Every structure is written in C-alpha cells, then in structure tokens.
Amino acid sequence: MNQQFRGGVFRIKQAAQYLGMGESTVWRKAKTDPDFPQPIKLSERVTAWRVADLEAYIERQASEVSA
C-alpha cells in the first residue's frame, strides 16, 4: 500500500477501485455484509472508508481463501 494513504480515507470511487469492485457493490456490501468495513461520515454529504479498514478486510478475505 502506498504510504501516503496510511491512516487516510478513500471516497467511494477510490474504495471501489482499491477493492476491485463496482461502486454499487461497495454500497451493497456495506449494507448487507457484517464483515465489510462500514463507511464514516466526514460531513453531511461526504462519506468515506478508512484505508486501514479496507486493508484489514482484504487481509481477512485472503486468509479465508488460503485456509
């Protein structure tokens, strides 16, 4: 992971690209998958995901596949 994003946040387009899925899939997973990272509200109209939460989600998914 690029060091500039450590401790940062991704908006929906960045999060979707990082996870390799569509934006609507990210929103759907956030609503229906209890293991999926939840977005945070930065303001009334701005929602984002913590990069660290997305990294942890990817690691969990990778460990489940390799187990």
Image: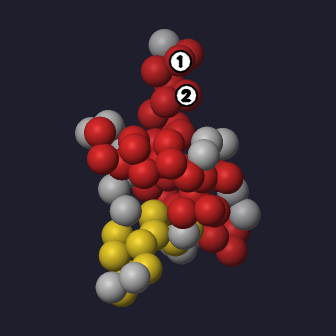
Image marks 2 and 1: residues in contact by CB distance under 8 Å: yes
- The answer to whether residue 22 is seen in the rendering is yes
Quarter holding the N terminus is bottom right
Q: In the rendered image, which quarter is residue 62 located in?
A: top right
Expressed as whole percent of the image width and height from the top left, the position of residue 56 reads: 46, 46
State left or right for residue 52 relative to residue 20.
left
Residue drawn at x 67%, y 53% is: 17
Above or below 64: residue 35: below
Mark seen at residue 54: none
- Tell me the kind of residue under disc 1: Val
> Between marks 2 and 1, how big is the CA–CA gap?
5 Å
Above or below 54: residue 46: below
The single residue placed furthest to the front in the displayed view is: 24
Residue drawn at x 54%, y 63% is: 12
Secondary structure under tag 1 reads helix
- The answer to whether residue 56 is seen in the rendering is no
Local packing at callout 2 (Cα closer than 10 Å; few below 14, some 14-19, many 20+) is few
The single residue placed furthest to the top in the displayed view is: 67
Local packing at callout 1 (Cα closer than 10 Å; few below 14, some 14-19, many 20+) is few
Residue drawn at x 33%, y 56% is: 38
Q: Which residue is mark 2?
A: 62
Secondary structure under tag 2 reads helix
- Tell me the kind of residue under disc 2: Ala
**Relative depth, front residue between 24 and 37:** 24
Q: In the rendered image, which quarter is residue 28 located in?
A: top left
Above or below 8: residue 61: above
**Relative depth, front residue between 11 and 23:** 23
Q: In the rendered image, which quarter is residue 47 located in?
A: bottom left
Expressed as whole percent of the image width and height from the top left, the position of residue 42 reads: 38, 82
Residue drawn at x 55%, y 68% is: 10
Q: Which residue is mark 1?
A: 65
